Image: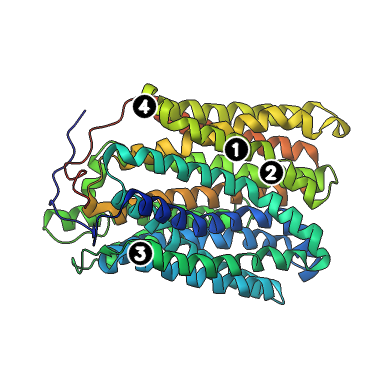
Amino acid sequence: MAAPQAVPQTGARLQEAPSARRRSLALAMLLLPTALTLLSVTTVNVALPAIRDSLGATAVEQSLVLTSYTIAFALVLLPAGRLGDRYGHKQVFIAGVVVFTLASAWCGLAPDATQLILARILAGIAGGLVLTPLNALIQLLFTGPERAKPFAVMGAVFGAASAAGPVLGGLLLQVGGEYGWHLIFLFNVPLGVLATVAAVLVIPRDNPLGARGSDPLGMLLFTAGILAVVLPFAAGTGVTPLNAALLAAGLLLMTGCMLWERRRERRDSFAIVPPRLFRQRALPIGIVSTFLGFAGFTASFLMLALLWLDGLGNDALAAGLVVTPFALGSVLGSLLSHSLSERFGTRIVTVGLTMISVCLLIVGALVLVLPAASLTFLVMLVPLLGIGLGVGLFVGPNTNAAFVQTASIDAGIASALIAAAQRTGTAVGIGVISALYALAPGGSAALPNHATAAFITAAMAGAAALVLVGSRRSAMPEPAEDDTEQF
């Protein structure tokens, strides 16, 4: 395996070396608002029919309520990493929590679909400001092998929060009646205020890198490329000449970004996305597997919600409760992931992705061959539990393996790239499934369309597993040289 690229032995540091207890409290305060931003992806799934009926939202507007959040989330990640490196990751995190709280209040009070979409865009921007510092601060709070446990806890929160979203959404819709969908957003407000105060008091302050130069063209090319790649999937309009042109333009912009950054590196100029990160093995593989894995399992929540609501005619609470086995499996898989990854290396990530893919194939087959009356919670219990276990084995170990060669000087940007892979994967996965329901005959009321959606999400997770098999990533790569100098 090639040695990691040499980088300057300087980087962000914490102003003080916190005790083990304070680090645990800080991790908890980092994960609370992060969980809220993830809940906001999936709580809306079960609320779509209520939003449609209340606001008269069109099919495109319904799709944008879902995808505008994840698109905005993805677009701000690289600037958030840059801001964290320059001004401090704690400051960026707290700013994100404050804006997310305000945006949630706007979502809950929105009088029409247009304002709801605009508020979701603002909430997505805030979510990006929250998520990027999370990974960077974990890298600063914990060193070397210590990081495996907090990343495993993070994986449990990611999976449980994503799965708990439909349950929480269903409960709030049931309790709130015609005002239920408003409560889904307003629920975040008091918790956001609490998280802001707690984060100020508990999370240690980091010493930022300060000004390292600027690369506005690199930032523009990267951001525009991400936007152009994701937009064709956002509105759920399927394959059109405009969407094909946007996708091609996005790929060209991303290629231009890479060429521009290599040119700046050769001239010893500051590069917003340092090419040295892609000469590692760990981070590029982690980015691709993260993108495909998140595209698969997060889109499956939309498929399950609409299957239960529109396909089978259940209420929102039942649609939420059906993913409870997923949440339990995700927590269990995450708790097991640390010890299993120590024994089997990152083979455990491949196993997790394979479990997700196989269990989604089983869900699709059940929907395809069984009559609607036979598609009960008990029938879905085992495959949904398996999907959750797979997610728990995937998220934490995959993230830990992706960062293992990253020096602290690159913590913010590397964190932004992984977070961007998570959010763009989510946006693309949800966009593909939304387009399927919008364009296929019968829409989300036709059971064969749900089977197709399950097969598509299974293919995405399976492709991520093939990436890891093809890259032969089984053992943890050698860590970065400055990995033990975090304090």
Q: CA distance from mark 1 to mark 2?
A: 9 Å
**Can residue 274 be seen in the rendering of this structure?**
no
Name the N-terminal-most of marks 2 and 3. 3
Mark 1 is surrounded, within 10 Å at the Cα level, by few (under 14), some (14 to 19) or many (20 or more) other residues, namely many
Mark 4 is surrounded, within 10 Å at the Cα level, by few (under 14), some (14 to 19) or many (20 or more) other residues, namely some
Instruction: Say which quarter of the image contains residue 111.
Output: bottom right
| Amino acid identity at mark 4 | Glu
Return the residue at label 2. 303
Return the residue at label 1. 457
Element under label 3? helix
Name the N-terminal-most of marks 1 and 4. 4
Name the N-terminal-most of marks 3 and 1. 3
Q: Quadrant of the N terminus?
A: top left
Cβ atoms at labels 1 and 2 below 8 Å apart = yes
Return the residue at label 3. 90
| Above or below: residue 309 compared with residue 111 | above
Q: Name the side, left or right, on which 409 lies relative to 313.
A: left
Query: Residue visible at 41% across and 37% down?
Result: 398
Name the N-terminal-most of marks 4 and 2. 2
Cβ atoms at labels 3 and 1 below 8 Å apart = no
Return the residue at label 4. 342
Query: Residue visible at 32% across and 41% down?
Result: 283
| Amino acid identity at mark 1 | Thr
| Amino acid identity at mark 2 | Met
Mark 3 is surrounded, within 10 Å at the Cα level, by few (under 14), some (14 to 19) or many (20 or more) other residues, namely many
Instruction: Say which quarter of the image contains residue 378.
Output: top right
Name the N-terminal-most of marks 3 and 4. 3
| Above or below: residue 145 compared with residue 433 | above
Q: CA distance from mark 4 to mark 2?
A: 34 Å
Instruction: From the image, state whether disc 3 or disc 1 is nearer to you.
Output: 3
Name the N-terminal-most of marks 1 and 2. 2
**Can residue 436 be seen in the rendering of this structure?**
yes
